[in-house]
């Protein structure tokens, strides 16, 4: 029997796994490009733009229900030019048209369904549409018919509406200049108060369901606690981290975090796992471990990094993959859930009973009659109800988790989106480098270095610019601001983990390209797209964080550190100018730009400039003493006094100039504003920073 798909459309030549999933739909899909846009103009047809990503559950649902339906596909093909976009490949398109959906409907999400005029202006849109009227949503065929008729019969109204939306987007996405704005700690106080007002005291996190992991916000609150000593800020961070770690959003068997929780108690997740979430949350747990010394946080960070190395890493080449799907075998979460009988088939009866009680595995289930493992109480509390010591219980649970994990590995795994994005790899390079610094595991440093090498070899263009994405041997799409900014941040952290000067030089080189390509020479600030990108209806400079930090905020995170390390006051000036440009959104909604607020905290403080002079074998105890402390606003440089290129290093890193060791021992120089304290060999000096 011939099982060859009946249809093939233009997506069959793409590399994105998400686009390839739609390559055999009866819809006449185009990838975004001149061929589709020219046809829309020449035939005067509206564009149906559908944006999603491969790990998105409701994207799969809409494909099965509508895009594989012959009658619905005919409606689409007859009335529209249909363009399918992977949001992870084209974050520029996603940002613009998601902002349009939010402006039109008050909410957003994926799949995104947007209708555009041939000149790319949005006039109607939404997210998921069912194949028939249900869920209090109109059916997709009714939407298609109504939009097509409106476009044909009320062209003037459509054009006016599209123009109004575009003007609204222009004002929303691009901030107004605030050249005289005073950058002060008042903004940091406002951010704390905003988080305080939205904090869920029962379940942790901020706001109500659905709950997204607030990695950037937790980093800001930790810095606020460090700056002010405000215990409530630290308490909000710790409570949230514990609740997330104990919930079903965290994979209790395999490590790593799912995308978000559909409920307020962190129990039922959307089961996809994203590289960026696991990168950002690793930073949160590592910093909390530094701040408190509590074992839970280092364990979750370690398990998450280990999950990434196991499931999301190309150990041959060094790139980190993008996402794991929510679905396996056509069912959301099937890979991750359990019944008591399945546990009883793996563990001895008494162990199975304790394991099920601890992880709340019941006959009735907590998710579609099956069970998502989660922790209801601490081991200390649980042993009050059983005849075991806490150490015995921990051993029993660890053994049970290992056995269930081994059995789970035999299941059909969720799909893997194995494209390698420069931006998200930059985030994970940073997390792996921090993991090495704080946890001391060489595997993390090796993975960070290997990923950086992969990007240098496979995602660098001949003229020194970057590509955005790589898959199946092909690198393409000019890199966006976030690619440069995230990668530069990763390279700075990789230098501070390895002290290999080439990573710092590469960070500096890319920073100069980033400024050349993305800096607005007229008003200041960084554009989302570079000078080499195609012109869209808007060239935004938004500083708001989404699921990932804004490119602008990470550019500041990088430049404010390089300004000190490399003695580049021009970098600092761009940081200050960008913060003033964004003063109004920072003042109105500071928690919406948490990552940028972290750079403001760095700028307003007196960052610690730490120079270490010593032989390589003298470094480990010094670095351990340093990284045992939470010192977020710092830069670190190392000089080997016997190194072959000592003069070159000193010349490149002014912080190291004329620094010498005391009596051939590892010596620490603590400097602020380029004024250094007396050198010392006392490792306790870090405890006071």
Image (cartoon, rainbow, N blue to C red):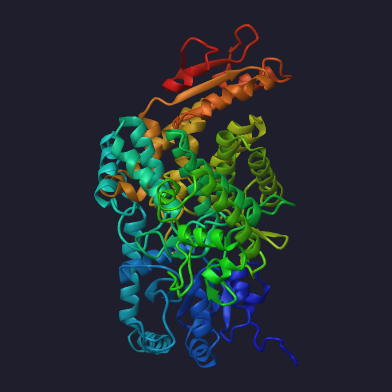
618 vs 146, nearest the viewer: 618
Q: Is residue 554 left or right of residue 604?
A: right
Q: Image point 56% across, 52% down: which residue?
A: 396
Which x, y percent locates residue 139? Answer: 39, 86
User: Dividing the image into 4 quarters, which one contains the C terminus?
Assistant: top left
Which x, y percent locates residue 197? Answer: 24, 49
Query: Within the image, what quadrant is residue 498 found in?
Result: top right
Residue 162: tell me if it is visible.
yes
User: Dividing the image into 4 quarters, which one contains the N terminus?
Assistant: bottom right
Q: Is residue 112 left or right of residue 352?
A: left
Which x, y percent locates residue 585? Answer: 30, 49
- Total residue callouts: 0
Please, is residue 682 above or below residue 586 in the view?
A: above
Which x, y percent locates residue 454? Answer: 69, 48
Q: Image point 33% across, 41% down: which residue?
A: 235
230 vs 302, nearest the viewer: 302
């Amino acid at each position: 029997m011939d099982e060859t798909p009946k249809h093939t459309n233009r997506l069959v030549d793409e590399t994105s796994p998400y686009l390839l999933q739609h390559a055999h739909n009866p819809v006449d899909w185009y990838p975004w490009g001149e061929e589709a846009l020219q046809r829309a103009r020449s035939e005067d047809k509206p564009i149906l733009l559908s944006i999603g990503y491969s790990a998105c559950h409701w994207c799969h649902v809409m494909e099965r229900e509508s895009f594989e339906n012959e009658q619905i596909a005919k409606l689409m093909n007859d009335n529209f030019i249909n363009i399918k976009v992977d949001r992870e490949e084209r974050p520029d398109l996603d940002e613009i048209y998601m902002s349009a959906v939010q402006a039109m409907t008050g909410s957003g999400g994926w799949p995104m369904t947007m209708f555009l005029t041939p000149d790319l202006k949005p006039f109607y849109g939404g997210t998921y549409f069912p194949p028939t009227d249900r869920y209090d949503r109109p059916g997709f065929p009714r939407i298609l018919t109504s939009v097509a008729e409106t476009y044909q019969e009320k062209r003037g109204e459509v054009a006016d509406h599209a123009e109004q939306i575009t003007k609204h987007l222009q004002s929303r996405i691009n901030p107004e200049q605030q050249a005289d704005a005073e950058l002060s700690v008042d903004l940091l106080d406002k951010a704390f108060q905003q988080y305080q007002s939205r904090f869920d005291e029962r379940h942790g996190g901020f706001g109500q369901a659905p709950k997204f992991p607030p990695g950037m916000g937790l980093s800001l609150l930790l810095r606020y606690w460090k700056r002010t000593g405000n215990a409530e800020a630290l308490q909000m961070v710790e409570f949230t981290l514990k609740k997330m770690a104990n919930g079903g959003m965290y994979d209790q068997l395999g490590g790593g975090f799912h995308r978000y929780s559909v409920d307020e108690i962190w129990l039922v997740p959307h089961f996809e796992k994203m590289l960026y979430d696991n990168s950002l949350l690793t930073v949160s747990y590592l910093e909390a471990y530094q701040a408190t010394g509590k074992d839970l946080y280092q364990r979750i960070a370690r398990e998450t990094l280990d999950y990434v190395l196991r499931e999301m890493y190309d150990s041959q080449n060094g790139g980190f993959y993008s996402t794991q799907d929510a679905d396996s075998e056509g069912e959301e979460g099937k890979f991750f859930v359990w019944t008591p009988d399945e546990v009883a088939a793996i563990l001895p009866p008494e162990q199975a009973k304790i394991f099920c009680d601890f992880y709340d595995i019941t006959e009735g289930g907590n998710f579609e009659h099956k069970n998502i493992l989660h922790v209801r109480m601490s081991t200390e509390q649980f042993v009050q109800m059983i005849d075991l010591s806490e150490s015995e219980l921990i051993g029993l649970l660890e053994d049970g988790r290992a056995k269930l994990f081994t059995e789970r590995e035999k299941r059909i795994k969720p799909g893997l989106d194995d494209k390698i994005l420069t931006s998200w790899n930059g985030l994970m390079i940073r997390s792996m480098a921090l993991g090495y610094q704080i946890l001391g595991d060489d595997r993390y440093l090796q993975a960070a270095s290997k990923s950086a090498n992969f990007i240098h070899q496979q995602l660098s263009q001949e003229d020194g610019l970057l590509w955005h994405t790589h898959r199946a041997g092909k690198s393409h799409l000019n890199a966006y601001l976030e690619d440069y900014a995230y990668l530069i941040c990763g390279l700075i952290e990789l230098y501070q983990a390895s002290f290999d000067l080439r990573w710092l030089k590469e960070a500096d080189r890319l920073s100069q390209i980033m400024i050349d390509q993305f800096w607005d020479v007229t008003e200041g600030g960084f554009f989302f797209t570079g000078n080499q990108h195609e012109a869209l209806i808007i060239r935004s400079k938004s500083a708001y964080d989404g699921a990932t930090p804004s490119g602008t905020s990470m550019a500041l995170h990088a430049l404010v550190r390089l300004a000190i390390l490399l003695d580049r006051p021009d970098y600092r000036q761009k940081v200050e100018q960008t913060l003033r440009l964004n003063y109004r959104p920072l003042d109105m909604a500071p928690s919406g730009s948490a990552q940028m607020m972290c750079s403001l905290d760095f700028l307003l403080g007196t960052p610690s400039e730490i120079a270490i002079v010593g032989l390589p074998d003298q470094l480990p105890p010094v670095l351990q003493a340093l990284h045992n402390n939470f010192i977020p606003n710092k830069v670190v440089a190392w000089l080997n006094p016997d190194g072959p290129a000592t003069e070159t290093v000193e010349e490149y890193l002014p912080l190291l100039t004329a620094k010498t060791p005391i009596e051939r021992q590892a010596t620490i120089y603590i400097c602020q504003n380029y004024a250094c304290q007396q050198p010392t060999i006392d490792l306790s000096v870090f405890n006071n920073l």
